[in-house]
Image (tube, rainbow, N blue to C red):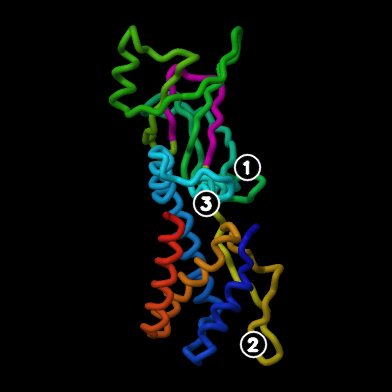
Amino acid sequence: MAVNVNTVYQTVLYILNKEQRGYVTPAEFNSLAVQVQDEIFNSYFPNANQLNRQNQNNTQNDTEFFNMFDEVSYKVASFIQEISLTLINDSTIGDVFHYPSVNTTTGLGNRTIYRIGEVISTYTGQPQYSSITQLVSKAEYSKIERSKLTKPTKQYPIYYYTKGAYESNYLKISPTPNSVNANALLKPLDPSWGFTPGSLNQYIYNVNTSRDFELNISEQSNIIMRILKYCGVIINDPTIIQVAEQESKEVEINDKS
């Protein structure tokens, strides 16, 4: 379940106006909302790394609903989509598979591809293989290719990321497959609080031109506190900054505990 952008904005305004500390316009709020959503989304990956180490050391609670590594995995699951890569003959490096920086084929809308995960290479013919492709460095790729003992096969293909003639979203795969699919992690779309002007030129929330935060509903308090921190900078109120920072740190510590 997503976080309602109007709920967040109204809560922020309520907290700011309660003691007449200032006002944040929709344009300012939307800029802060995008920044905060990106911060939280990007924080999942180092946090998950740390939590995964706790799992491996048996120091993480594995009870249902209380395993924090699973919680982070759940939060990003909706952004994972399988994409097809396109075979291109690049003038500098030959046959490569290309993935666009923006995925236009997903049913989730036009989204920036944040990371590429598991790569599956498919080889037609008899027998047919659909093989998990191992990521290696360019130097390792060259060594493996030249060795008779380790030369990649259709069952055990390898690949590396490379920069072609025009852009860097290329995978060089050996042996060259007939088709390639990959799990892609897509970035959430930017939140936006849309409005229509009222008779007194006030801002009236318009759900049709708005977009909610795409983060999990459990992030609502975190989003509000982080936005308030930036609001304190805008209205030059150090008290709001200090309180919001303290609350954000407490949330972060609890998430990693």
Q: Amino acid at mark 2?
A: Gln
Give coordinates of residue 172: x percent, y percent.
Answer: 42, 27
Look at the image and say whether residue 180 sits in the magenta stretch.
Answer: yes
Give coordinates of residue 196: x percent, y percent.
Answer: 68, 79
Q: Where are the magenta residues, as a range? A: 170-184
Look at the image and say whether residue 110 sits in the magenta stretch.
Answer: no
Which element type, helix, strand or loop, lies under badge 1?
A: loop
Q: Which residue is mark 2?
A: 202
Tell me which residue sits at (31%, 11%) in the image.
147
Which element type, helix, strand or loop, lies under badge 3?
A: loop
> Do we see residue 102 in this rendering?
no
Q: Amino acid at mark 3?
A: Lys
Please identify the quarter of the rendering in which residue 165 is found: top left
Which element type, helix, strand or loop, lies under badge 2?
A: loop
Tell me which residue sits at (33%, 7%) in the image.
148
The disc placed on residue 187 is: 3
